[in-house]
Amino acid sequence: MFKLETRYALHAAVVLAGNDALVPNARLAERLGVSLPMVAKIMNRLVQAQVVVSRPGPGGGYALARPAERIRLLEVVAPTEGDDWGQSCLLGLAACDDEHPCALHGAWGRLRDHIQVMLRERTVAEMAAGVVDLDLKVVPGDVPQA
């Protein structure tokens, strides 16, 4: 559902939330299981979005720009996914909209809306603690009958 970069950005935010000190590039790369250039690319986007701060050089690294309780998950997702995340057709059709919907248009729209609310309301601290819940309610007709 999310780009690979976004999944790494979310994982990086959790790693940073669990550290009081700066986390060096090499340690972050090891924790994420990615290369140093990939860490640099992802973290640069988070720094530009003012989610993360960085200090170069010996003793440098990355830290959250604010307490994890004050960083919404959407702030971590938006720099890699873009502001229009989830707006395109789930099936990749160019002409999918409310007037000409694909077979998944309605269900995807409701699910996307729930996910976007969760990303706006939940924080990095909650994700790090493992307490993020989507709390979806299935609407009759959303799930095909067997």
Image (cartoon, rainbow, N blue to C red):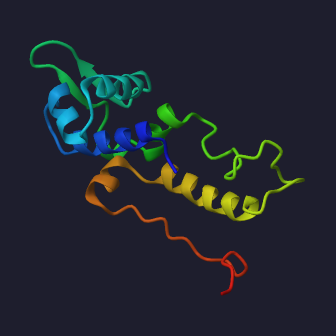
Query: Whole-percent x and y of residue 37?
Result: 30, 22
Q: Residue at left 53%, top 37%? A: 81
Q: Is residue 66 left or right of residue 72?
A: left
From the viewer's perspective, tell me whether residue 100 is left or right of residue 47.
right
Q: Quadrant of residue 8?
A: top left
Considering every residue shown, the one lying at the far right of the view is 99
| Horizontal side of residue 84 vs 71, given as left or right | right
Location of residue 126 (image quadrant): bottom left
Residue 88 vs 146, above or below: the answer is above
- Which of the 4 image quadrants contains residue 10? top left
Q: In this picture, is 77 found above or below 103?
A: above
Q: Residue at x 19, y 41 (%)?
A: 31
Residue 142 seen: yes
Query: Picture coordinates of residue 77 (x, y %)?
Result: 47, 40
Position of the C terminus by quadrant: bottom right
Residue 24 can be seen in this image: no
Q: How many numbered marks are there?
A: 0
For this rendering, which residue is in front, 17 or 105? Answer: 105
Q: Residue at x 31, y 34 (%)?
A: 66
Farthest residue to the left: give it.
Answer: 59
